Image (spheres, helix red, strand yellow):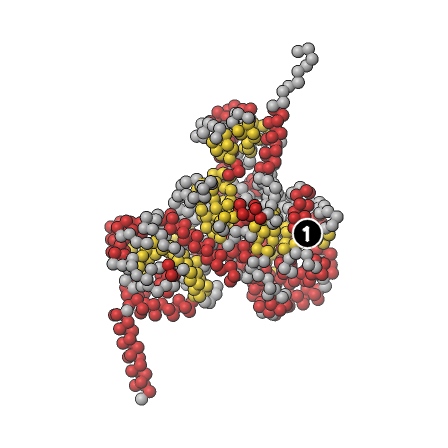
Amino acid sequence: MGWIYLLVLLALLVAAGIGMMIWRPDQFVRLVAWIPVRLLYRMRIYGPEVIPPTGPVLLVCNHVSYIDAFLVFMAQKRPIRFVMWAPYLRLPGLRILLRLARAIPIDGSAGPRAIVQSLRMAGEALALGDAVCIFAEGGITRTGFLLPFHRGFEQILKRTPAPVIPVCLDHVWGSIFSFRGGKVLWKWPQKLPYPVSIAFGQPMPPTVTAVEVRQAIQKLSADCSIAAASKRRPVHRQFIRMAARHPFRTCVIDSNTKKVFRCGEVLAGASILAKKLRSLLGEESMVGVWLPPSPGGVFANIALAMLGKVSVNLNYTSSPDGVRSAIKQCGIGHVLTARPFTAKMKLDPGPEVKLIHLEDFRKEVTTLQRLRAFLTVLLLPAFVLDRWVFRLGDHKPDDLATVIFSSGSTGEPKGVMLSHRNLAANVESVVQAIDLGPKDRLLGILPFFHSFGYTVTIWVPLLVGASVVYYPDPRQAMEIGQLCRTYRCTLFLSTATFLRFLLKRCEPGDFSTLRLLICGAEKLPQSLAQEFHEKFGVMPLEGYGCTELSPVAAANVPDWSGTGARQLGNKAGTIGRPIPGVAARIVHPDTFEALPADKEGLLLIYGGNVMMGYLGKSEATQQAIRDGWYVTGDIGKFDSDGFITLTGRLARFAKIGGEMVPLERIEEELNVILGATERTCAVTSVPDDKRGERVVVLHVPLNGMDIRQLCQQLTRRGLPNLGLPGERDFFLIPEMPVLGSGKLDLKRVKELALEKTAKSQVPEPVSVGQ
């Protein structure tokens, strides 16, 4: 009898399923999709209420994985007709669900007529009052970046106007149905269930363009990054998880001693150092660090984070007055350093500041203490280490993590306050942008007082289990090339200035193992990039960021090619696209009104990486951050593919005769005329009684080119004649003033220009009797 009841129940379920397929096919699809979606994903949904319950609406979504349609479908209540790649509708099993959902097939390989027919079907669906969703990128991203949007949906809206709702699928990159790692399905899921975010933006008018919708989705990605802040652990607590899971994984390599530190050793060593420092530092909130990029610097920064202290990596290339100013602003009472380093880089912090030499602690630590600390990391679960052993439960994302002083290239350095929330958001974005994993090895040469050095060469590799080879002096080109070759590094972050050193002294095979070389901090001349590529076979790609952005905001990445298709990852002369979780906007410098593509304006950046503010400078913070958008001070423009080209800085324009003259553009053209890969000219402005300002060129020896000839060629470069420097405006200097980060020291350039022009205007003394 039991079998009879079971068969009857089964028959009823089959009948119910068939009935649902006939009368409520959308609910049947929802029921079937519910199991795999809820099993594999944990969805965070934002703004589904913006979708009208009835009437036509067009949802425009980014495309990250093969399961995107089901994620959008399950994130809201309305039946949706998806415009989907036609071959999906021919897959066994899946085609039944898609046909029940009345998916609209589209196939670019079938010719223009077939595409027009598909777009017409989508328009007819809107005319019937349906909700339609289109993936405007035309394909799944293989780079993790938002791809250019096709304009097909604009054609749909011209025939059938309807409100447009931007939809962002965030954090889907990395799930088993995405292409992260170059594989779909054939990879272990990073988490189960995998956390993803689906965000629906405010409705946009039918006249909206593809570029505008794309920027709206990028903004939603940044909103998701901000909303996820409370879910992210502070970076040092996340490192504890990594070290506890993989204690024997290579983590830090000391290039001087050849010592290799495993993740477990790094955590154990940092915990020992934290215990030693606890009584010495007391209630002091901010602690200085005077160390080069090295394992000691890494241990010091981790230990301070574990103590809940704010680390301040002091700029040892700055002037003594600048260092003391930073110490005073932060109220620093102790500085962590090492005697061998202070012997090379003198430090005079003032009489009230005490130096703590880390090598003294190393002598005090016994083998038994090291073994006990390592076994603690090895044997105890991560949450026990976090909560009860190290007692970090009260360390929150909004806590201040570090203060990094800006380079001061245009004025007095300011203390930039970065929270653990800022760092964690930027680390997550960077990892997605460059697809960093445990098999990668970074070449770490950037100083930790440099925001790129601090975030990207300390915390980024620590949190993903990658390893880093540290070297203390980025100017020692030959040694850096040998390290890259010896340790087979795959990722290298540098600046254009340091690339010039490498070109002179490194061998062609030194960088053959690199898969990615990214330059930031200053503009990367294309002539320099090309020369580097010709010698080493590696093309440097330009990225963009600043201390106030924790620091990375945009980057070029390698193109993807496969199966006859290609996705653009970089464009020469641009700083790339905004990285995932970060949004950019170009606005009018005076009105802050958003500008369309290819229109120059002021660059703003938005996301979880935007700083807390400037230390002790509330007015400067209010000027720098407007409604959550950081005002970079850079002038640039978007193109239709989302790449950003910088054309200068707002501070690097001279106002001559009422017109704005771009100093950086003149500087670039001069270097092109000279055919120089090294920085040869620096352009600035000085006051002028007649026209308001005057353009001045400081230069090192010009390889025999005559100033008159240089001026003549400059007039033929298409620049407005107003403001072009004349022969009297060129001044020879022995060397270019640069900061420790490699950037041009614009403040010193201005001072030199004022000195030179003042001397040139002093009349010659007249002898008595003449």
Q: Residues within 10 Å of mark 1 (few under 14, many from 20)?
A: many
In the picture of the structure, the residue carrying the numbered disc 1 is 332
In the rendered structure, the answer to whether residue 293 lies left or right of residue 574 reads right
**Quadrant of res 475:** top right
Question: Residue 550 in the image: x percent, y percent?
Answer: 54, 51
Q: In front here: 46 or 378?
A: 46
Q: In front here: 480 or 289?
A: 289
Q: Residue furthest right?
A: 351
Question: Residue 633 in the image: x percent, y percent?
Answer: 51, 42
Looking at the rendered structure, the kind of residue marked 1 is Ile
Label 1's element? loop
Q: How many labels were placed on the picture? A: 1
Question: Residue 660 in the image: x percent, y percent?
Answer: 48, 33
Q: Which residue is drawn at 45% across and 27% down?
A: 716
Question: Residue 299 in the image: x percent, y percent?
Answer: 64, 57
Q: Which residue is drawn at 67% across and 51% down?
A: 331
Q: In front here: 494 or 405?
A: 405
Q: In front here: 469 or 410?
A: 410
Q: Which residue is drawn at 42% across and 45% down?
A: 594
Q: Which residue lies furthest to the bottom in this view?
A: 1
Quarter of the image that includes the N terminus: bottom left
Q: Residue furthest top?
A: 769
Q: Which residue is drawn at 61% across and 26% down?
A: 758
